[in-house]
Image (tube, rainbow, N blue to C red):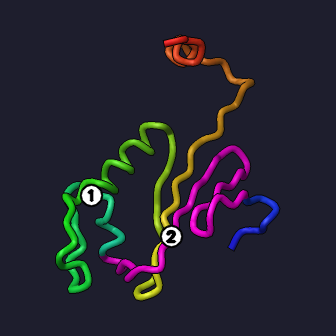
């Protein structure tokens, strides 16, 4: 998948990569997979996949919507790749902190705050 020299393995299914100016994370599963039609809607609020395999699984359909909102609020991106009956890989990438950039007052306060 990715060359081992750019990966730090935390466990078999969660990796952290430091590539260029982003810090991407990926989470893999070996579940039922997600159809292309469902992929387009999966990050919408209250969306639930309706398949026989998902019957009886509770949830509100807000988890991935909230993850997308929070990720984008922090300047990141979230997406997925999936293949039916083989599982899915969810990616989240955040911009890396650049110590050479000027911080605004809010960032400076939070960074130096002892609260």
Residue span colored magenta:
8-37
Q: Is residue 29 left or right of residue 103?
A: left
Residue 35 included in the magenta stretch of the image:
yes
> Mark 1: few, some, or many residues within 10 Å (few <14, many ≥20)?
some
The answer, for residue 38, to whether it is visible in the render is yes
Q: Residue at x 18, y 79 (%)?
A: 55
Residue 53's tag is none
> Mark 2: few, some, or many residues within 10 Å (few <14, many ≥20)?
some
Residue 16 included in the magenta stretch of the image:
yes
Coordinates of residue 100 in the picture (x, y in percent) = 74, 24
Q: Is residue 74 left or right of residue 4?
A: left
Q: Which residue is mark 2?
A: 89
Coordinates of residue 89 in the picture (x, y in percent) = 50, 70
Q: Quadrant of residue 69?
A: top left
Query: For the view shown, which residue lies furthest in the front direction?
Result: 11
Q: Residue at x 31, y 76 (%)?
A: 37
Q: Is residue 65 above or below residue 73?
A: below
Of labels 1 and 2, earlier in sequence is 1
Quadrant where the N terminus sits is bottom right
Q: Residue at x 38, y 50 (%)?
A: 68
Q: Is residue 112 above or below residue 10?
A: above
Task: Give the distance between the C-alpha atoms of the residues marked 1 and 2, in whole angstroms.
Answer: 18 Å
Q: Quadrant of residue 14?
A: bottom right
Coordinates of residue 97 in the picture (x, y in percent) = 65, 33
Q: Which residue is mark 1?
A: 44
Does dot 1 land on a helix, a strand or a loop?
loop
The answer, for residue 82, to whether it is visible in the render is no
Query: For the view shown, which residue lies furthest in the right direction?
Result: 5
């Amino acid at each position: 998948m990715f060359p081992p020299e750019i990966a730090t393995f935390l466990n078999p299914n969660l990796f952290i990569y430091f590539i260029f100016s982003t810090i991407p994370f990926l989470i893999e599963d070996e579940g039922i997979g997600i159809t292309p039609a469902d992929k387009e809607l999966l990050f919408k609020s209250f969306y639930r996949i309706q398949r026989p395999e998902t019957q009886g699984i509770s949830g509100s359909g807000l988890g991935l919507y909230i993850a997308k909102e929070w990720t984008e609020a922090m300047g990141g991106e979230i997406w997925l790749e999936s293949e039916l009956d083989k599982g899915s890989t969810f990616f989240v990438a955040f911009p890396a902190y650049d110590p050479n950039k000027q911080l605004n007052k809010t960032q400076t306060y939070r960074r130096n705050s002892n609260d």
